[in-house]
Amino acid sequence: RTVYVNGEYLPETEASVSIFDRGFLFADAVYEVTSVLGGKLIDFDGHAVRLERSLNELGIESPISKEDLLEVHRNLVKENGIDEGLVYLQISRGADSDRDFVFPDTDKVKPTVVLFTQNKPGLAETVKPIKVISVEDIRWGRRDIKTVQLLYPSMGKMMAKAAGADDAWLVEDGFVTEGTSNNAYIVKGGKIITRALSNDILHGITRAAVLRFAREAQMEVEERNFTIEEAQEADEAFFTSASAFVMPVVEIDGVQLGDGQPGPVMTRLREIYLEESLKKAE
Ligand code: PMP
């Protein structure tokens, strides 16, 4: 694979970043994952806008323009022959050999920019009925910033695997926040219910698109908190993310939902999402 590091395209075996990089030492970095279908980027603009916001929230000056970022994404997709897959992007505050908690001066330390691709053939066709367990959400309070502090979500996924499930839904003060790497939804009487945006959850790019398409299709959407108990009694449950699109959740803490099959609302949303997103893919 060819990867991109700070302005250079290199074979992955020759690419490196400093051991003093603050992404490595402090998780002082943000990221984005953009999916590729038919060799084109899905919702690149949404990801670029959120990246800008994340950088801004952390006071990291954007080291690359949106136009240049799009070009790097496209170059890597082409160079690596990605038809279906993902582009991973990470920007850290940079490498500072002082290892000081205080942010280094921006004229001294420049952000580190890394991009690589992942080939995922069959991405658009893969619909896996997901079993989730609930775990306490003990992440920090700024989940709206897409940082690389992914240890707890990673542990949550491991707890799920150990319990014979696929993923975990995180619960805070009795209410579901989101999945370890996705936004969570339930469906009741045709109504799509998902937690409202706040600092408690990541503002999913797929979430924004799916809710917009749902409203355009005259489907009812309610942005509010829900509990695990309410989810277990729902008609359907699902999650959204850039790498899985819309995915059915058929079991929550060992309780099967409905007949345990992907539901009609989720199935329709997935179809609309893929169709509409592909139209404006770049
Ligand atoms: N929540 C969390 C915690 C995530 O990590 C992700 C995916 N990175 C999402 C939600 C979904 O966001 P998106 O649709 O932009 O991929």
Image (cartoon, rainbow, N blue to C red):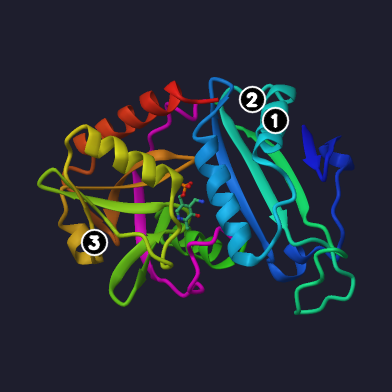
**Sequence-first tag of 3 and 1:** 1
User: Can you tell which of label 2 and label 1 is closer to the viewer?
Assistant: 1
Looking at the image, do the residues carrying marks 3 and 1 touch, with CB atoms under 8 Å apart? Answer: no
Q: Which residue, given by chain and number where applicable, does mark 1 sit on?
A: 71
Secondary element type, mark 2: loop
Q: Quadrant of the N terminus?
A: top right
Amino acid type at image mark 2: Ile
Q: Is residue 262 visible?
A: no
Q: Which residue is mark 3?
A: 224
Which percent across, then down, holds residue 130? 36, 47
Q: Main secondary structure of the magenta part?
A: loop
Which stretch is magenta? Answer: 122-147
Amino acid under disc 1:
Glu
In the rendered image, residue 133 lying in the magenta stretch gets the answer yes
Residue at the image point whose x is 75% and y is 24% from the top: 79
Total marks shown come to 3
Q: Earlier in the sequence, mark 2 or mark 3?
A: 2
Query: How dense is the environment of label 3, judged by Cα within 10 Å: few (below 14), some, or many (20 and up)?
Result: few
Question: In the drawing, what numbered circle is on residue 90?
Answer: none
Q: CA distance from mark 3 to mark 1?
A: 38 Å
Q: Which residue corresponds to mark 2?
A: 82
Label 3 secondary element: loop
The crowding category of the residue bearing disc 2, from other C-alpha atoms within 10 Å (few below 14, some 14 to 19, many at least 20), is: many
